[in-house]
Amino acid sequence: MSKVPYSSAIGSLMYAMVCTRPDIAHVVGDVSRFMSDPGKEHWQSVKWILWYLRGTMGTIFCYSGSDTTLRGYVDLDMVGDVDSRRSTTGYIYTVGGTAVSWISQLQKLVALSTMEAEYVVATEVSKEMIWLQQLLKELGHKQEECKMHSDSQSVIHLAKNSAFHSKTKHIQLRYHFIRTALEEDKLKLEKIHTSQNPADMMTKVVTRDKLKLCSALMQTVKTRVGKYELGRTLGEGAFSKVRVARNMDTGERVAIKVHDKQRVLQNKMIERIKREISTMQLIKHPNVVQLHEVMASKTKIYIVLEFVTGGELLDKINDLGRLKEDEARRYFQQLINAVDYCHSRGVYHRDLKPENLLLDTFGDLKVSDFGFSALSRDTRKDGLLHTTCGTPNYVAPEVISGKGYDGTTADLWSCGVILFVLMAGYFPFDESNIIALYRKINKAEFKIPKQLSPGAKNIISRILDPNPRTRITMADILKDEWFRKGYKPPKFPKEDVIMYDIHDIFSDSEEYLVMEKKETQVVLRNAFELISMSQGLDLGTLFEKPMGIVKREKRFISKKSCIEILSKIEEAVTPLGFNVEKQNHKMKLKSVKAGRKGNLAIATEVVEVAPLLVMVNFRKDAGDTLEFQE
């Protein structure tokens, strides 16, 4: 840098600012004033800008042909230049949420008041809007309504009403152009809160959080993998993340399980992922979450799954306490249908529990998460499985013993525990001490609630038999009188089964890899996007039978700014023993102390509904649902 002329460095920064970086417009304007005699502090400022650019190289612009809505934001900092007494003005115009025109400069005149300065800049900016409006019209994108946003209520009133007083009567006639534009409906001038105005960063120094907020209001980067556009995170585990996605060809929503290849290799998870994919390829059943596709990039593995909107069965149990017998029986029938089919295909789930049982829009059950599954070929010479896995409260006695077990009878035991939980609202075996818990499971020490019918009591007691040899079989359950009541056999969809070569996803060959593309999208969500975030108002299921809202998410509306809300949340949860990680308008809360199901993790997102209204969304990522509700 010592041999680079200061003016050349400023010229390069200006080039970057004009082309793609409105976020550095104000600071580049400041450092450019010292080109005649730069000092060490000016050079240091230039270096800081370069470091910032290096750290934000992922910031890109991407324009969508489907959304060409024109929006404008204007701001002013009174007497921004102390020497000349001129104000700093700035504006940003976006098309489809992405910046297309911006400027940060000193006002040409010396205004006598803040109102005069802001009124003049509003007129200058309105000319740019009309020019952009005509340009879009010539390109075939007519604008029905062009909105310009200002954080000055007095300027908006003055522009809409021809009121003159001592502070405005001397304003030159040419600066009243905005009144004509408003009267002819060429644009609309609306109020935006200062904390939400992205043009703020064009006129003054802002905090890091405010800078991130301003940038986020204009654009955010979304990832497109193959034909899928990735959306918000639905859940996060130790080794993977599940995100909702949209098939760009069909519009269908799917869930994509994303694995990081490096973490998979480091934790020796390759065989587990291969087994999960192999298993799901074999299962095509209406009560099992369907595998659509498997893809891989150089760094990620993508498992594309059916998107199930009704939440976990566990959420319904937590909400209602226990289910009515007919409803519990219907879920149990669908569970047995799915598990029996899996067994017929040589697949053993080995981790059946309400958390892995999802509900679709019609209230039908879907078995998910085959990460611990085993195939019949995984048995040893004795014909038994020997890997101890599963969730303690649902594990069969023979699995605990470590002497080998039949996957069929072990899964059936878990089904019996699930039926008990559905009808009683609590575990048949539950102890804080793991040794005491296993002792109860081995002896099948539990009490059946008195309110259950004789048929329900009989089938539960026959399933929860600690001896796998005398335990009731699937065939006998399907013939049971209590089970058969209201029974509806599954209807299998006619679909072609596509088999994927699971070795390809770990290949480095370009032939098998999909491209990851980053696209910028509008963060200010419209009504349809906000409604679709609620499982109770899912627009994708508008003409289907509705389900109750699940309890893994909590939301509320506030008129406070995003920064203020995030700050208040951090203040509230820190004394409760949570670590806080912040990124833009999102926050990750993780409890220091482990609960019944590990550390509680809560994802928090603040979404702007309107300029003065935000929605705060809390989602449980990990841990116990009951602890999350508390």
Image: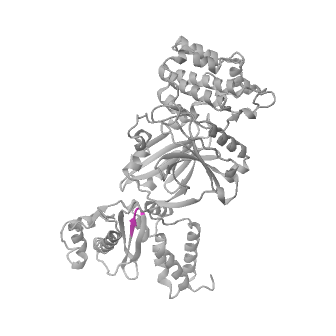
Left/right placement of residue 600 relative to residue 503 reads: left
Instruction: Give the colouring mode of the picture.
Output: one colour
Image: 308 above or below 129: above
Which residue is found at the position 49% from the left and 44% from the top?
Answer: 618
Which residue is found at the position 72% from the left and 27% from the top?
Answer: 399
Q: 437 or 432: which is nearer to us? A: 437
Q: 168 or 440: which is nearer to us? A: 440
Which residue is found at the position 54% from the left and 18% from the top?
Answer: 483
Q: Is residue 94 magenta?
A: yes
Place of residue 61 in the rendered image (x, y in percent of width and height, measured from the top left) = 48, 66
Q: In the rendered image, which quarter is residue 168 located in? A: bottom left
Mostly what secondary structure, the magenta segment? strand
Image: 284 above or below 420: below
Residue at the right extreme, as displayed: 381
Place of residue 88 in the rendered image (x, y in percent of width and height, measured from the top left) = 38, 75
Image: 479 above or below 144: above
Place of residue 364 in the rendered image (x, y in percent of width and height, measured from the top left) = 49, 31
Place of residue 604 in the rendered image (x, y in percent of width and height, measured from the top left) = 50, 48
Which residue is found at the position 63% from the left and 21% from the top?
Answer: 474
Image: 237 above or below 45: above
Q: Is residue 93 magenta?
A: yes
For the question of whether residue 449 can be seen, the reply is: no
* Number of marks present in the image shown: 0
For the question of whether residue 294 can be seen, the reply is: yes
Q: Which residues are magenta?
A: 92-97
Residue at the bottom extreme, as displayed: 36
Q: In the rendered image, which quarter is residue 472 located in? A: top right
